[in-house]
Image (spheres, rainbow, N blue to C red):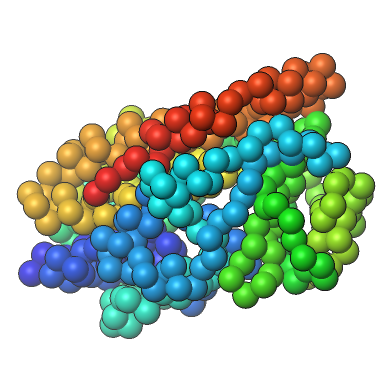
Amino acid sequence: MSKAVIVGGGIGGLATAIGFIQRGWEVEVLERSTRIAEVGAGLSLWPNALRALDALGLGEEVRARAIEDGASGIRDSKGRWLSRTDLTAVRARYGSPIMMHRADLLDILRAAVPESALRTGLSVTAVRSDGTVVHSTGVLRGDVIVGADGIHSVVREAVCGEITPRYSGYGAWRVVVMPTEPMGDMGETWGRGERFGYGALADGRVYCFATANMPAGTPGGGLAELRRRFGTWHDPIPSLLAAADESAVLKHDLYELPALKTYVAGRIALIGDAAHAMTPNLGQGACQALEDAVVLARVAAEDGDLTRYDRQRRPRTQMIAARSARIGTVGQLSSAPAVALRNAVLRLVPAGVQFKALAPVLDWEI
Protein backbone atom coordinates (compact mmCIF):
# COMPACT_ATOMS: atom_id res chain seq x y z
CA MET A 1 0.00 0.00 0.00
CA SER A 2 1.28 3.47 -0.91
CA LYS A 3 1.82 5.91 1.92
CA ALA A 4 1.49 9.69 2.20
CA VAL A 5 3.09 11.60 5.06
CA ILE A 6 1.42 14.97 5.53
CA VAL A 7 3.22 17.63 7.55
CA GLY A 8 0.62 19.97 9.02
CA GLY A 9 -2.84 19.26 10.41
CA GLY A 10 -4.69 22.37 9.30
CA ILE A 11 -7.44 22.68 6.70
CA GLY A 12 -5.18 21.87 3.74
CA GLY A 13 -3.36 19.01 5.44
CA LEU A 14 -6.52 17.27 6.64
CA ALA A 15 -8.24 17.72 3.28
CA THR A 16 -5.22 16.17 1.56
CA ALA A 17 -5.29 13.26 3.99
CA ILE A 18 -8.94 12.63 3.11
CA GLY A 19 -8.14 12.73 -0.59
CA PHE A 20 -5.42 10.10 -0.20
CA ILE A 21 -7.53 7.92 2.09
CA GLN A 22 -10.30 7.93 -0.53
CA ARG A 23 -7.81 6.40 -2.95
CA GLY A 24 -6.76 3.63 -0.59
CA TRP A 25 -3.49 5.13 0.62
CA GLU A 26 -2.07 4.83 4.09
CA VAL A 27 -1.79 8.28 5.64
CA GLU A 28 0.06 9.86 8.56
CA VAL A 29 -0.60 13.47 9.50
CA LEU A 30 2.12 15.10 11.61
CA GLU A 31 1.02 18.16 13.55
CA ARG A 32 3.34 20.27 15.70
CA SER A 33 0.60 21.39 18.11
CA THR A 34 -0.53 19.01 20.81
CA ARG A 35 -4.08 19.15 19.47
CA ILE A 36 -5.69 20.02 16.17
CA ALA A 37 -7.79 23.13 16.72
CA GLU A 38 -8.60 26.44 15.05
CA VAL A 39 -8.74 29.97 16.41
CA GLY A 40 -11.94 32.02 16.42
CA ALA A 41 -12.44 33.47 12.97
CA GLY A 42 -14.82 33.27 10.05
CA LEU A 43 -14.10 31.85 6.64
CA SER A 44 -15.57 32.41 3.18
CA LEU A 45 -15.82 29.35 0.98
CA TRP A 46 -16.43 30.18 -2.67
CA PRO A 47 -18.06 27.74 -5.13
CA ASN A 48 -14.69 26.48 -6.36
CA ALA A 49 -13.84 25.36 -2.81
CA LEU A 50 -17.25 23.76 -2.40
CA ARG A 51 -16.63 21.69 -5.53
CA ALA A 52 -13.40 20.48 -3.94
CA LEU A 53 -15.26 19.59 -0.74
CA ASP A 54 -17.90 17.78 -2.81
CA ALA A 55 -15.09 15.71 -4.34
CA LEU A 56 -13.96 14.81 -0.82
CA GLY A 57 -17.51 13.76 0.06
CA LEU A 58 -17.97 16.56 2.60
CA GLY A 59 -19.76 19.29 0.67
CA GLU A 60 -23.24 18.74 2.08
CA GLU A 61 -22.01 18.43 5.66
CA VAL A 62 -20.08 21.68 5.29
CA ARG A 63 -23.06 23.50 3.78
CA ALA A 64 -25.25 22.30 6.66
CA ARG A 65 -23.02 24.10 9.17
CA ALA A 66 -22.66 27.29 7.15
CA ILE A 67 -24.78 30.18 5.91
CA GLU A 68 -24.94 31.64 2.45
CA ASP A 69 -22.42 34.46 2.12
CA GLY A 70 -24.43 37.62 1.61
CA ALA A 71 -21.54 40.02 0.99
CA SER A 72 -23.08 42.74 -1.16
CA GLY A 73 -20.07 44.77 -2.21
CA ILE A 74 -17.88 47.65 -1.11
CA ARG A 75 -18.85 50.94 0.55
CA ASP A 76 -16.98 54.01 1.72
CA SER A 77 -16.71 54.93 5.38
CA LYS A 78 -19.96 56.91 5.23
CA GLY A 79 -21.81 53.90 3.88
CA ARG A 80 -22.13 55.00 0.25
CA TRP A 81 -21.84 52.16 -2.26
CA LEU A 82 -18.69 52.00 -4.35
CA SER A 83 -19.29 48.60 -5.88
CA ARG A 84 -22.15 46.09 -5.76
CA THR A 85 -21.74 42.32 -6.13
CA ASP A 86 -24.24 40.59 -8.42
CA LEU A 87 -24.88 37.66 -6.09
CA THR A 88 -27.78 36.45 -8.20
CA ALA A 89 -25.48 36.04 -11.20
CA VAL A 90 -22.82 34.33 -9.07
CA ARG A 91 -25.37 31.85 -7.72
CA ALA A 92 -26.80 31.14 -11.14
CA ARG A 93 -23.43 30.55 -12.79
CA TYR A 94 -21.31 29.01 -10.03
CA GLY A 95 -23.49 28.23 -7.02
CA SER A 96 -23.74 30.01 -3.68
CA PRO A 97 -20.65 30.99 -1.68
CA ILE A 98 -20.94 30.31 2.04
CA MET A 99 -19.60 31.70 5.29
CA MET A 100 -18.71 29.55 8.30
CA HIS A 101 -16.47 29.44 11.33
CA ARG A 102 -13.02 28.06 10.59
CA ALA A 103 -13.25 25.76 13.60
CA ASP A 104 -16.40 24.15 12.20
CA LEU A 105 -14.68 23.32 8.91
CA LEU A 106 -11.67 21.95 10.74
CA ASP A 107 -13.93 19.77 12.92
CA ILE A 108 -15.61 18.28 9.85
CA LEU A 109 -12.27 17.54 8.17
CA ARG A 110 -10.74 16.09 11.33
CA ALA A 111 -13.69 13.77 11.88
CA ALA A 112 -13.15 12.33 8.39
CA VAL A 113 -9.56 11.28 9.18
CA PRO A 114 -9.06 8.18 11.36
CA GLU A 115 -7.64 8.94 14.78
CA SER A 116 -4.86 6.44 14.11
CA ALA A 117 -3.61 8.61 11.23
CA LEU A 118 -3.15 11.74 13.38
CA ARG A 119 0.10 12.28 15.28
CA THR A 120 0.20 15.50 17.29
CA GLY A 121 2.97 17.15 19.26
CA LEU A 122 5.61 16.28 16.64
CA SER A 123 8.04 18.81 15.20
CA VAL A 124 9.43 18.06 11.76
CA THR A 125 13.05 19.14 11.51
CA ALA A 126 14.03 17.99 8.01
CA VAL A 127 12.56 16.48 4.86
CA ARG A 128 14.43 14.90 1.95
CA SER A 129 13.27 14.47 -1.62
CA ASP A 130 13.62 10.68 -1.37
CA GLY A 131 10.59 10.63 0.95
CA THR A 132 12.36 10.80 4.32
CA VAL A 133 10.87 12.88 7.13
CA VAL A 134 12.91 13.56 10.28
CA HIS A 135 10.84 14.61 13.28
CA SER A 136 11.23 15.08 17.02
CA THR A 137 10.77 11.41 17.88
CA GLY A 138 12.18 9.58 14.88
CA VAL A 139 12.15 9.13 11.12
CA LEU A 140 9.33 8.34 8.67
CA ARG A 141 9.31 7.46 5.00
CA GLY A 142 6.54 7.94 2.48
CA ASP A 143 5.82 7.58 -1.20
CA VAL A 144 4.60 11.20 -1.14
CA ILE A 145 5.49 13.85 1.42
CA VAL A 146 3.07 16.75 1.60
CA GLY A 147 4.17 20.11 2.95
CA ALA A 148 1.00 21.56 4.49
CA ASP A 149 2.86 23.36 7.26
CA GLY A 150 2.01 26.96 6.46
CA ILE A 151 3.82 30.09 5.41
CA HIS A 152 6.86 29.28 7.60
CA SER A 153 7.06 25.76 6.17
CA VAL A 154 9.96 23.52 7.08
CA VAL A 155 9.11 21.21 4.19
CA ARG A 156 9.41 24.05 1.66
CA GLU A 157 13.13 24.39 2.28
CA ALA A 158 13.66 20.91 0.79
CA VAL A 159 11.84 22.04 -2.35
CA CYS A 160 12.93 25.63 -2.87
CA GLY A 161 15.66 26.41 -0.37
CA GLU A 162 15.20 29.25 2.09
CA ILE A 163 12.32 31.55 1.11
CA THR A 164 11.53 34.65 3.15
CA PRO A 165 7.86 35.68 3.37
CA ARG A 166 7.30 39.33 2.55
CA TYR A 167 5.21 41.74 4.58
CA SER A 168 2.15 43.12 2.82
CA GLY A 169 2.41 46.54 4.47
CA TYR A 170 -0.71 46.15 6.58
CA GLY A 171 -1.94 44.28 9.61
CA ALA A 172 -5.31 42.69 10.29
CA TRP A 173 -7.78 42.17 13.11
CA ARG A 174 -10.38 39.40 13.36
CA VAL A 175 -13.17 39.08 15.89
CA VAL A 176 -16.47 37.21 16.16
CA VAL A 177 -19.30 39.07 17.91
CA MET A 178 -22.95 38.54 18.79
CA PRO A 179 -24.75 41.59 17.37
CA THR A 180 -27.30 43.53 19.40
CA GLU A 181 -29.27 44.62 16.34
CA PRO A 182 -30.14 43.10 12.93
CA MET A 183 -27.43 43.36 10.32
CA GLY A 184 -28.02 45.01 6.96
CA ASP A 185 -26.05 44.26 3.81
CA MET A 186 -22.83 42.40 4.48
CA GLY A 187 -19.59 43.34 2.78
CA GLU A 188 -16.52 45.54 3.05
CA THR A 189 -15.95 49.22 3.69
CA TRP A 190 -12.87 50.95 2.31
CA GLY A 191 -11.38 54.05 3.87
CA ARG A 192 -7.93 55.65 3.65
CA GLY A 193 -5.37 52.93 4.38
CA GLU A 194 -8.02 51.06 6.38
CA ARG A 195 -10.78 48.54 5.62
CA PHE A 196 -13.53 46.89 7.64
CA GLY A 197 -15.72 43.95 6.66
CA TYR A 198 -18.31 41.72 8.26
CA GLY A 199 -20.30 38.62 7.44
CA ALA A 200 -22.95 36.51 9.17
CA LEU A 201 -22.28 33.07 10.67
CA ALA A 202 -24.85 30.29 10.92
CA ASP A 203 -25.30 30.63 14.70
CA GLY A 204 -26.30 34.30 14.56
CA ARG A 205 -22.88 35.70 15.33
CA VAL A 206 -21.03 38.02 12.97
CA TYR A 207 -17.45 37.66 11.83
CA CYS A 208 -15.66 41.02 11.59
CA PHE A 209 -12.29 41.72 10.03
CA ALA A 210 -10.29 44.89 9.54
CA THR A 211 -6.99 46.00 8.04
CA ALA A 212 -4.76 49.04 8.45
CA ASN A 213 -1.44 50.16 7.05
CA MET A 214 1.30 49.87 9.65
CA PRO A 215 4.91 48.71 10.02
CA ALA A 216 5.41 45.02 10.68
CA GLY A 217 5.47 44.21 14.39
CA THR A 218 3.50 47.29 15.48
CA PRO A 219 2.58 46.60 19.13
CA GLY A 220 -0.80 46.92 20.75
CA GLY A 221 -3.83 47.00 18.55
CA GLY A 222 -6.68 45.59 20.62
CA LEU A 223 -10.31 46.55 20.79
CA ALA A 224 -9.54 50.13 21.80
CA GLU A 225 -7.61 50.69 18.59
CA LEU A 226 -10.36 49.12 16.49
CA ARG A 227 -12.89 51.46 18.05
CA ARG A 228 -10.60 54.45 17.58
CA ARG A 229 -10.05 53.66 13.90
CA PHE A 230 -13.53 52.48 12.89
CA GLY A 231 -15.94 53.64 15.62
CA THR A 232 -17.22 56.59 13.57
CA TRP A 233 -17.75 54.64 10.34
CA HIS A 234 -21.22 53.85 9.05
CA ASP A 235 -23.69 51.58 10.84
CA PRO A 236 -23.56 48.84 11.97
CA ILE A 237 -19.77 49.00 12.41
CA PRO A 238 -19.89 51.01 15.69
CA SER A 239 -22.46 48.64 17.22
CA LEU A 240 -20.47 45.59 16.16
CA LEU A 241 -17.38 46.99 17.85
CA ALA A 242 -19.43 47.89 20.92
CA ALA A 243 -20.54 44.25 21.15
CA ALA A 244 -17.01 42.85 20.78
CA ASP A 245 -15.08 41.33 23.65
CA GLU A 246 -11.43 42.24 24.10
CA SER A 247 -10.41 38.61 24.64
CA ALA A 248 -11.88 37.62 21.28
CA VAL A 249 -9.83 40.10 19.22
CA LEU A 250 -7.04 38.57 17.14
CA LYS A 251 -4.41 40.79 15.53
CA HIS A 252 -1.61 39.76 13.21
CA ASP A 253 0.59 41.08 10.42
CA LEU A 254 -0.24 39.89 6.92
CA TYR A 255 2.55 38.20 4.98
CA GLU A 256 2.65 36.53 1.58
CA LEU A 257 5.10 34.36 -0.32
CA PRO A 258 6.95 35.37 -3.48
CA ALA A 259 6.08 33.23 -6.50
CA LEU A 260 7.95 29.93 -6.09
CA LYS A 261 9.69 28.31 -9.07
CA THR A 262 8.20 24.93 -8.24
CA TYR A 263 5.88 23.26 -5.74
CA VAL A 264 7.51 19.84 -6.02
CA ALA A 265 10.87 18.11 -5.63
CA GLY A 266 11.23 14.34 -5.91
CA ARG A 267 8.55 12.86 -3.66
CA ILE A 268 7.69 16.17 -1.98
CA ALA A 269 4.76 18.42 -2.87
CA LEU A 270 3.72 21.71 -1.26
CA ILE A 271 0.12 22.79 -0.73
CA GLY A 272 -1.74 25.73 0.76
CA ASP A 273 0.20 28.48 2.50
CA ALA A 274 3.43 26.47 2.29
CA ALA A 275 3.23 26.89 -1.49
CA HIS A 276 1.32 30.11 -2.13
CA ALA A 277 0.49 32.05 1.05
CA MET A 278 -1.52 35.03 -0.12
CA THR A 279 -3.24 38.06 1.34
CA PRO A 280 -6.92 37.48 2.20
CA ASN A 281 -8.34 40.05 -0.20
CA LEU A 282 -10.05 37.50 -2.47
CA GLY A 283 -11.07 35.12 0.29
CA GLN A 284 -9.24 32.34 -1.55
CA GLY A 285 -6.51 31.13 0.81
CA ALA A 286 -8.37 28.13 2.23
CA CYS A 287 -10.22 27.65 -1.05
CA GLN A 288 -6.97 27.14 -2.94
CA ALA A 289 -5.66 24.75 -0.28
CA LEU A 290 -8.78 22.62 -0.75
CA GLU A 291 -8.27 22.60 -4.51
CA ASP A 292 -4.62 21.63 -3.97
CA ALA A 293 -5.69 18.70 -1.79
CA VAL A 294 -8.01 17.22 -4.40
CA VAL A 295 -5.62 17.64 -7.31
CA LEU A 296 -2.56 16.31 -5.46
CA ALA A 297 -4.33 13.16 -4.25
CA ARG A 298 -5.67 12.50 -7.73
CA VAL A 299 -2.33 13.00 -9.49
CA ALA A 300 -0.44 10.88 -6.95
CA ALA A 301 -2.94 8.03 -7.30
CA GLU A 302 -3.07 8.18 -11.10
CA ASP A 303 0.61 8.04 -11.98
CA GLY A 304 2.64 9.59 -9.15
CA ASP A 305 4.08 12.27 -11.46
CA LEU A 306 4.12 15.20 -9.06
CA THR A 307 5.32 17.55 -11.78
CA ARG A 308 1.80 17.25 -13.18
CA TYR A 309 0.46 18.61 -9.90
CA ASP A 310 2.91 21.49 -10.18
CA ARG A 311 1.84 22.28 -13.74
CA GLN A 312 -1.82 22.27 -12.79
CA ARG A 313 -1.63 24.19 -9.55
CA ARG A 314 1.25 26.66 -9.67
CA PRO A 315 0.03 28.94 -12.50
CA ARG A 316 -3.49 29.11 -11.08
CA THR A 317 -2.58 29.74 -7.47
CA GLN A 318 0.07 32.31 -8.36
CA MET A 319 -2.41 34.15 -10.59
CA ILE A 320 -4.89 34.29 -7.72
CA ALA A 321 -2.22 35.36 -5.21
CA ALA A 322 -1.10 38.17 -7.53
CA ARG A 323 -4.67 39.31 -8.05
CA SER A 324 -5.29 39.30 -4.30
CA ALA A 325 -2.17 41.40 -3.75
CA ARG A 326 -3.34 43.95 -6.33
CA ILE A 327 -6.73 44.25 -4.66
CA GLY A 328 -4.94 44.84 -1.35
CA THR A 329 -2.79 47.56 -2.87
CA VAL A 330 -5.86 49.38 -4.16
CA GLY A 331 -7.86 48.79 -0.99
CA GLN A 332 -5.09 50.12 1.23
CA LEU A 333 -4.49 53.37 -0.65
CA SER A 334 -4.18 56.17 1.88
CA SER A 335 -3.57 59.51 0.15
CA ALA A 336 -6.74 61.56 -0.27
CA PRO A 337 -6.36 62.14 -4.04
CA ALA A 338 -5.63 58.45 -4.72
CA VAL A 339 -8.59 57.34 -2.59
CA ALA A 340 -10.92 59.81 -4.31
CA LEU A 341 -9.83 58.53 -7.72
CA ARG A 342 -10.16 54.90 -6.65
CA ASN A 343 -13.66 55.46 -5.33
CA ALA A 344 -14.74 57.30 -8.48
CA VAL A 345 -13.44 54.50 -10.69
CA LEU A 346 -15.11 51.79 -8.60
CA ARG A 347 -18.48 53.55 -8.93
CA LEU A 348 -18.12 53.55 -12.73
CA VAL A 349 -17.35 49.86 -13.16
CA PRO A 350 -20.51 47.97 -14.22
CA ALA A 351 -21.56 45.00 -12.09
CA GLY A 352 -21.36 42.79 -15.18
CA VAL A 353 -17.68 43.59 -15.63
CA GLN A 354 -16.98 42.69 -12.01
CA PHE A 355 -18.89 39.42 -12.42
CA LYS A 356 -16.84 38.46 -15.48
CA ALA A 357 -13.65 39.22 -13.56
CA LEU A 358 -14.56 36.48 -11.09
CA ALA A 359 -14.58 33.79 -13.79
CA PRO A 360 -10.87 32.88 -13.70
CA VAL A 361 -11.15 32.33 -9.96
CA LEU A 362 -14.51 30.58 -9.68
CA ASP A 363 -14.63 28.49 -12.86
CA TRP A 364 -12.29 25.77 -11.55
CA GLU A 365 -13.54 22.26 -12.15
CA ILE A 366 -12.15 19.03 -10.74
| Front residue of 266 and 328 | 328
The residue at the point 12 percent across, 56 percent down is 301
The residue at the point 74 percent across, 36 percent down is 81
Query: Is residue 7 in view from this perspective?
Result: no
Query: Is residue 21 in view from this perspective?
Result: yes
Q: Position of residue 269 (x, y in %)?
A: 27, 48
232 over 330 or under it: above or below: below
Q: Is residue 90 left or right of residue 232?
A: left
| Front residue of 186 and 53 | 186
Q: Position of residue 248 (x, y in %)?
A: 74, 68
Which residue is the extreme one toward the bottom? 115
Q: Position of residue 201 (x, y in %)?
A: 61, 67
Q: Is residue 250 left or right of residue 337?
A: left
Q: How many marks?
A: 0
The residue at the point 82 percent across, 16 percent down is 337
Q: Quadrant of residue 218?
A: top right
213 over 270 or under it: above or below: above
Q: Is residue 259 left or right of residue 233?
A: left
**Which quadrant holds the N terminus?**
bottom left
17 over 91 or under it: above or below: below
Q: Position of residue 122 (x, y in %)?
A: 41, 70
The residue at the point 24 percent across, 49 percent down is 366
Q: Is residue 8 left or right of residue 17?
A: right
275 over 173 or under it: above or below: above
Q: Quadrant of residue 158?
A: top left
